[in-house]
C-alpha cells in the first residue's frame, strides 16, 4: 500500500487530499499540532511544525510527503504577523528536510507548498513557471515577494538526493469549505455586493479543488516533474468577469462594486490586506499542460457551476 504524509493537513486543502488519497486506498497520515482520533481511515500524528520528533518514523518508506504548513496570509502584515508567517513556513520546511535526511528509506517525493503570488503583477502576460518575478508598488506585494522567496530558498537549500522535490506554486483554490473563497463570494453576491473589486481589471488565477488533488496525484506519478510547478487552471480571468459569473450563478441581476478606497477600509476592519485582492495574477500551468495533465474544470464557469450545484 502506498503511503502519503500530509504535514499541516487538517485544513481545507489537507482534508480534500486526505479524502482523495484514501479513496485510492493509500495510507494517509496527517501531521498536526493537535492530533485526534478520526472516524475515517486517516491517522493523525503529533508534531510541532518546527523540530524533528517521533513523527519522523512515519516518513520511512512513504511514497510522498506534502507540506501544507503555514499561517494564513489573510491577516494584517504587522511585524508580529510577518514573523509568524515566515516562521510557520520556513521552520516546517526545514524540519521536514531534516527528517528526510534521517530516513533510511526516505519518501520518493516531497511536495512543498508555495505560492503563485511570486509572479509579477501583470494584465497582459501569461506567467508559466519561467514567468517574471518581482514586486510592484501598485500591487502592494513587496512583503509577499520576500516571504515566498525565503520559503522557496529554504526548500531549495535542503539536499535530498533520494527524494524528488516539487514546489507547489498554488493559486486560489476553489471549494465549498467554510474557509475557502467560494462561499464568501457567493454570500456577498446574494447580498447585492457582487460587483467588481478595485478596477476589476486585475486577473484572478484559480484551480478547482478536485483538479488540485488530481494534480498532486499526477505530479507524484510523473517523475520528470520537479522544481516549481504552477497549480492553476489554464484560463485566468479578470476580477470583473469572475464576479459577473458569480452573479449569473446566483441569479443576481446586479452587484455593487467595491472601489479601492472601500477595500482599504474594509480590509482594515477585517484585519486583512488589499494587495491580496488588487494584485493581478495571470498564472498558467505550463508544466502540468506540457506533461499531458487534463483539467476537469478548465474554465471558471464550469468550476463554479460544479461547486454550487453540489450544494
Image: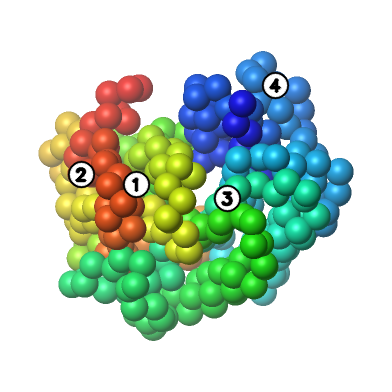
Q: Earlier in the sequence, mark 4 or mark 3?
A: 4
Q: Which residue is mark 1?
A: 207
Single out the mark in the foreground, 4 or 3. Answer: 3
Q: Residue at x 17, y 31 (%)?
A: 251
Regarding residue 261, the answer to whether it shows in the image is no
**Residues under labels 4 and 2: Cα distance?**
35 Å
**Residues under labels 4 and 1: Cα distance?**
28 Å
Judging from the image, what secondary structure is the residue with disc 3 in? strand
Q: Earlier in the sequence, mark 2 or mark 1?
A: 1
Single out the mark in the foreground, 2 or 3. Answer: 3
Quarter of the picture holding the C terminus: top left
Q: Which residue is mark 4?
A: 38
Q: Which residue is mark 2?
A: 299
The answer to the question of whether label 2 and label 3 lie on touching residues, with beta carbons closer than 8 A, is: no
Please tell me how crowded label 2 is: few (under 14), some (14-19), or many (20+) other residues with Cα within 10 Å.
some
- Location of residue 24 in the rendering, given as x and y in whole percent from the top left corner: 50, 24
Q: Residue furthest right?
A: 54
Horizontal side, residue 10 vs residue 37: left or right = left
The colour scheme used to paint the residues is rainbow
Q: Residue at x 55, y 22 (%)?
A: 25
**Residues under labels 2 and 3: Cα distance?**
30 Å
**Residue 168 against residue 33 in the figure, above or below:** below
The answer to the question of whether label 3 and label 1 lie on touching residues, with beta carbons closer than 8 A, is: no
Q: Earlier in the sequence, mark 4 or mark 2?
A: 4
Single out the mark in the foreground, 3 or 1. Answer: 3
Q: Which residue is mark 3?
A: 109
**Residues under labels 4 and 3: Cα distance?**
26 Å
Please tell me how crowded label 4 is: few (under 14), some (14-19), or many (20+) other residues with Cα within 10 Å.
few
**Residues under labels 2 and 1: Cα distance?**
9 Å
Judging from the image, what secondary structure is the residue with disc 4 in? loop
Please tell me how crowded label 1 is: few (under 14), some (14-19), or many (20+) other residues with Cα within 10 Å.
many
Amino acid at each position: 500500500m502506498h503511503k502519503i504524509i500530509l504535514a499541516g493537513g487538517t485544513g481545507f486543502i489537507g482534508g480534500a487530499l486526505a479524502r482523495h488519497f484514501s479513496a485510492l486506498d493509500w495510507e494517509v497520515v496527517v501531521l498536526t499540532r493537535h492530533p485526534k482520533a478520526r472516524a475515517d481511515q486517516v491517522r493523525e500524528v503529533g508534531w510541532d511544525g518546527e523540530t524533528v520528533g517521533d513523527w519522523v518514523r512515519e516518513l520511512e518508506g512513504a511514497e510522498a510527503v506534502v507540506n501544507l504548513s503555514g499561517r494564513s496570509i489573510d491577516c494584517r502584515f504587522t511585524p508580529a504577523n510577518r514573523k509568524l508567517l515566515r516562521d510557520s513556513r520556513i521552520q516546517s520546511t526545514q524540519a521536514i528536510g531534516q527528517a528526510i535526511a534521517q530516513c533510511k528509506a526516505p519518501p520518493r517525493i516531497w511536495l512543498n507548498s508555495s505560492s503563485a503570488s511570486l509572479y509579477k503583477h501583470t494584465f497582459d502576460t501569461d506567467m508559466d513557471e519561467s514567468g517574471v518575478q518581482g514586486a510592484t508598488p501598485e500591487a502592494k506585494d513587496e512583503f509577499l515577494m520576500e516571504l515566498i522567496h525565503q520559503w522557496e530558498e529554504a526548500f531549495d537549500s535542503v539536499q535530498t538526493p533520494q527524494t524528488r522535490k516539487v514546489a507547489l506554486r498554488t493559486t486560489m483554490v476553489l471549494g465549498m469549505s467554510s474557509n475557502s473563497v467560494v462561499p464568501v463570494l457567493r454570500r456577498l453576491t446574494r447580498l447585492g455586493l457582487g460587483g467588481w473589486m478595485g478596477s476589476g481589471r486585475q486577473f484572478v488565477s484559480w484551480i478547482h479543488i478536485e483538479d488540485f488533488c488530481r494534480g498532486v496525484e499526477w505530479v507524484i506519478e510523473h517523475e520528470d516533474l520537479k522544481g516549481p510547478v504552477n497549480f492553476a487552471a489554464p484560463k485566468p480571468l479578470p476580477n470583473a468577469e469572475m464576479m459577473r459569473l458569480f452573479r449569473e450563478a446566483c441569479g443576481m441581476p446586479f452587484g455593487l462594486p467595491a472601489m479601492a478606497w472601500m477595500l482599504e477600509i474594509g480590509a482594515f476592519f477585517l484585519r486583512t490586506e488589499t494587495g491580496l485582492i488588487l494584485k493581478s495574477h495571470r498564472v498558467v500551468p505550463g508544466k502540468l499542460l506540457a506533461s499531458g495533465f487534463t483539467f476537469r474544470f478548465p474554465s471558471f464557469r464550469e468550476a463554479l457551476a460544479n461547486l454550487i450545484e453540489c450544494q
